[in-house]
Amino acid sequence: MAEAPAPPPPAPPDARKSIYVISDSTGETGAKVVQAALLQFRHEQVRLRIFSNVRDTAEILKTIDKAAAEGALVVYTLVNAEQRMAAHDRAAQYGVRALGLMGALMTRIGRWLGENPRSQPGILHRLDEEYFRRIEAMEFAVKNDDGQLPRNFKRAEIMLVGVSRTSKTPVSTILAQKGYKAANLPLVQGVKPPKETDEGDPLRVFALTISPRALFEIRRARLEHLGVDGSGYADMEQIQRELAWARDIVRAHPDWTVVDVTNRAVEETASEILKHYTSRFGSPTI
C-alpha cells in the first residue's frame, strides 16, 4: 500500500465535536442513523456534517483528511467495496475513528442470499422519487377523470377518449400506478370534444373502442348492479349511434391510436397502451 501523505495540520479548536457522514448518495441514510444514535447523548455538543454524492475515491480520501485535521468521527455509507476499503485504510493511517454502515450489512445479506450486491449508489433515492411520481400521477388521474379539467389535457402524458363504459377510468388508474399522468374524456353523442383535446400531442391520445354487443352487455350489467332502468343507456340502437359518433371523431384525428378493449381486461388494455407509448416516448422521466 502506498505511503499516505503527511496528515493535515489540526484545525482551530472548536467547542463542538464533528461527525462526518460521507455518502455516495444523498447522505440521508447515514444522517438518520447518526441522529438516532445521538438522541442517547447530549448531541447539542456535536456538529453533523454531511458530504453527499461523493463518488470519486480521491474526494473520499480528501474528506477523511479534513476529518483527521478536525478530529472528527467519520461515518460512511459507500456501496462500492473498493471505496469502502480506501476509506477504511486512510482512516486507519490517520487514526481517524470511522465506521462503515453499509459494508458489513451488505456482505451478510449477500452471503445469506447467495448473490453479490449491485453496488449502485442512490438506489433508495431513486425508489423514493419513483414513489412520489406515482403519487403525483394518481392525484393527476383523479383530478382529470371524466374530462373534469380540460385545461390539463396538454399536461397529460397519456390521454384516453371513448364512449361510456370503455374502461377509461380503471385504465387511467393502472397507468397512474405505473407513474404515468393519464387523463380521460368521455365521447358523448352530439357533444364535440373541448378544444383543449387538440392542444396536446396527438400521439399521446388513445381512443378506446369496443364492439356494440360487448358494450351492450357491460352497460346492462351495470344497470342491473345499480338497480335502475336506464333502458336508453343499454339500448342497442343507441349504443350503435354512440359508437358511430365516436368513430367519426376518431377518423377526424388520424394521429390518435385506436385500442380495441373488446373482451380485454383493463390490465391488458393498459399494457397495450404502454407498448405504444414507450416505443414513442420512453418511460416516465424521474
Image (cartoon, helix red, strand yellow):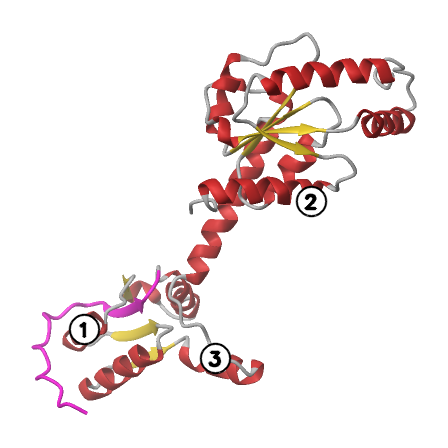
- In the image, which is nearer the foreground, mark 1 or mark 3? 3
| Quadrant showing the N terminus | bottom left
Front-most of 76 and 252? Answer: 252
Mark 2–mark 1 distance (CA, rounded to whole Å): 49 Å
What residue did someone put label 2 on?
Answer: 267
Q: Which residue is mark 1?
A: 58
In the rendered view, does 119 fall on the left or right side of 272? left
Q: Is residue 16 magenta?
A: yes
Q: Is residue 166 left or right of residue 57?
A: right
Q: Residue at x 50, y 83 (%)?
A: 108
> Residue 180's spot in the image, x, y percent?
53, 40
Q: Tell me: residue 130, above or below residue 243.
A: below
Helix, strand or loop status at disc 3: loop
User: Residue 283 placed where, x, y %?
Assistant: 48, 46
Label 3: few (<14), some (14–19) or many (≥20) C-alpha neighbours in 10 Å: few
Above or below for 100 versus 33:
below
Location of residue 169 by image quarter: top right
Residue type of the residue flagged with mark 1: Ala
The magenta segment: 1-25
Whether residues under marks 2 and 1 lie with C-beta atoms below 8 angstroms apart, the answer is no
In depth, the one of 270 and 84 nearer the eye is: 270
**Residue picked out by circle 3:** 116
Residue drawn at x 50%, y 46% as measured from the top left: 132
Q: Earlier in the sequence, mark 2 or mark 3?
A: 3
Of mark 2 and mark 1, the one earlier in the sequence is: 1
Relative vertical location of residue 125 with respect to residue 281 in this rendering, above or below:
below
Task: Label 2, secondary structure: give it.
Answer: helix
Q: How many marks?
A: 3
Numbered tag placed on residue 25 in the rendering: none
